[in-house]
Image: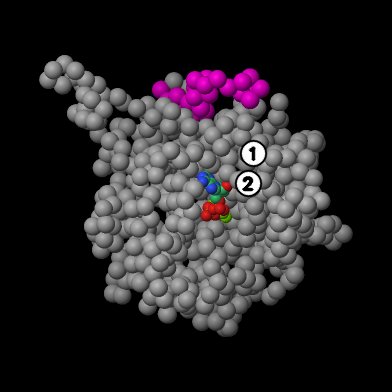
Amino acid sequence: MGLLALGTPLDWPEAKKKADQVRQWGIEQLLANWQRCKGKERDALLWGDEVEYLVVALDDAAKKARLSLAQADILESLARDEALWQAGSSANDKGEHAGEQPPHFHPEFGRFMLEATPGSPWGIGFKDLLKVESNMKWRREVAKAHMAPNESPITMTTYPRLGTNDYTQPYYPPSGTAFRSQFVPDQIANPHIRFPTLAANIRSRRGRKVELNVPIFKDVNTPVPFKDPTVNYDLHLWPEDDDVRNGAAKDDHVYMDAMAFGMGSCCLQITFQAKNMTEGRMMYDQLSPLGPILLALTAATPIYKGFLVDTDVRWNQIGNSVDDRTREELGEAPLANDRWSIPKSRYASNSTYISQDPRLRKEYLDPDLVIDEDIKKRLMDGGMDDLLATHFAHLFIRDPLVIFSEDLEKLDLNQGDHFENLQSTNWQHMRFKPPPSDKDDIGWRVEFRPMEIQITDFENAAFCIFLVLITRAILSFDLNFYIPIQRTTENMETAHKRNAVLDSKFYFRKDPFPRRVHRSNGNGASSGANTPPPSPPLNPVETEYELMTISDIMNGSTDGSFPGLIPLVESYLNSLNVDVETRCSLASYLDLIRKRADGTLWTGARWIREFVAKHPAYKQDSVVSDEINYDLVKAVEEITAKEGRDGSVGWEMLRGKKN
Ligand code: ADP
Ligand code: MG
Ligand code: MG
Ligand code: MG
């Protein structure tokens, strides 16, 4: 999560007037920082994960599950404890975590959410990989210890009945000045002024409420056409109540109207530090095509607002929940006041590649990329190269959404606040993070953001471990996953389909191995390191990739033409001296991913769907009632609590058995 500065936030009409100033100052801060840090070398290969939780309150007597809005109390209590820990005087027993820093807890958008990261980033060693799962479990235990006895942190991506009746503790009626939602109260969001301002300014800039229409899952008893029965067409409290009368709620879709329905979702994110900027830019490009694949593999989002939906992942819903584009920018009205028609929400898959890699063909770049030419020129005049300048000139087509008037008095080139204002509200599936302006010990980092949070920590650890290992394999073998970036955009859509992990095909590069060209020069000697060899004739870009199943991509194709990412990771491990015990432990995590890719194990989405389908109260009408919701949340809570102790609750399909 980005900054949590305090101050006086500007309402949208005022903020809009200051947008150019913030952008310009942000670009000056970026340039100053880039000048300072572009030559940073030999940073450690650190990485760290982020796990987001929903806090649920279970009322077992009434068989009722609610979201707890106790974030502030829980965080306060955690912070007190962390201070005691740092002072070495906490009553908490670190036990097996002796030597590890206590986990960090962070606020999130939803007042029912928490985020936890390891106390310090993980190092390059394999032993650290084996600490991740127990560290994640520790975070859960610590979080739980600071909650009321009936509260628990669970890792479902979305709360199945968010936006229905009586689903928060305490209860607040819907409709407040920030969201103007007919389903959720403003109190559902973190009360820190940044969050309601963000929601209100997105709504104001857009000129109407955000609009999420998710296709309903059509079961045998689902009405045809399905008209979302929870939509109220008779409200007259806010001008935005007209939205539904103007057709905002679509037939055969579940309709939602507030940022909380998207930004209230939980993700699993990983940040890698590269040894220098060049390596970071390479990691950014090479991990980008993996985004949709990992999104489909981690699919865990089959329910919205009490209905089964026909999509499996959260991504586009978040995109729609923060889509601040005007009608002109959306292409629904001719351009009159706005500068561009913009194809994607500010929360969307990436549209740029940034590596100065000779393998990056211009055909891979987005020909329709929208950039601010003036910003690009300023960056290039300041010395930045075309590709990186293009990347930031693309991010900076957006307006800053939350501006504090106190920050507009003086430009401080030793800070990065204005840069971060734009950077941290461009929520793309990859984020290229420059070193913080005010911290010398942090290098160039790349964040991988598409994954859905998994119900168990075994799964969450497995996906982190896979991602760390494939990143190492990419660096070690100089792998090449480039495809035209529009194919990644299309893959991202594909990943939304129900059961895409098994039923859909994704564009992927056929040959991931580097092609080293050693042509002789006139003297018969091969080219030196500083003189690039002449380029070989290149095949048409379309012949470089094809549609593959996720099983082919992850495990290798049956005809052997594609090696598979897991086998590549294994070759990488084989190339190193990894002791047998570590190797076995790593294998159990990789096995989960292998089996999920081939369908032996289920995604969370599939597991949840089966749970609902088999529930005695389910009427085959797509409705996830209060009763089903309670049992589902309870089952999820028990799975996490019992994980590693027994497998008696029928969740083997989800996470497999550890050896
Ligand atoms: P954000 O929410 O902006 O992505 P967070 O601080 O929540 O940022 O999470 C960043 C993650 O990066 C954490 O897991 C943290 O451990 C990790 N991290 C911190 N410093 C470094 C570093 N120098 N290199 C790599 N990872 C780091
Ligand atoms: Mg977060
Ligand atoms: Mg974070
Ligand atoms: Mg993050």
Residue 387 image position (x, y, % from top left):
29, 48
Splitting the image into four quadrants, where does ligand 2 fall?
A: bottom right
Q: Is mark 2 within 8 Å of ligand 1?
A: yes
Residue positioned 63% across, 25% down in the render: 582
Q: Main secondary structure of the magenta part?
A: helix
At 38% across and 49% down in the image, what residue appears? 37
Q: Are marks 2 and 1 in contact (CB under 8 Å)?
A: yes
Using the rendered view, name the quadrant where residue 187 is placed: bottom right
Task: Say which residue label 2 marks.
Answer: 118
Q: Can residue 104 be spotted in the picture?
A: yes
Q: Secondary structure at mark 2?
A: loop
Picture layout, residue 255 above or below residue 466: below
* Residue behind mark 1: 132
Q: Residue at x 76, y 43 (%)?
A: 94
Please report whichever mark, 2 or 1, sits nearer to the chain's N-terminal start.
2
Which residue is the extreme one toward the left?
522
Question: As rendered, which of 122 and 624 lies closer to the eye?
Answer: 122
Mark 2 surroundings within 10 Å by alpha-carbon count, few (fewer than 14), some (14 through 19), many (20 or more): many
The part of the chain drawn in magenta is: 561-584
Quadrant holding the C terminus: top right
Q: Residue furthest top?
A: 524
Q: Which mark is residue 154?
A: none
Q: Is residue 306 visible?
A: no
At mark 1, the secondary structure is: helix
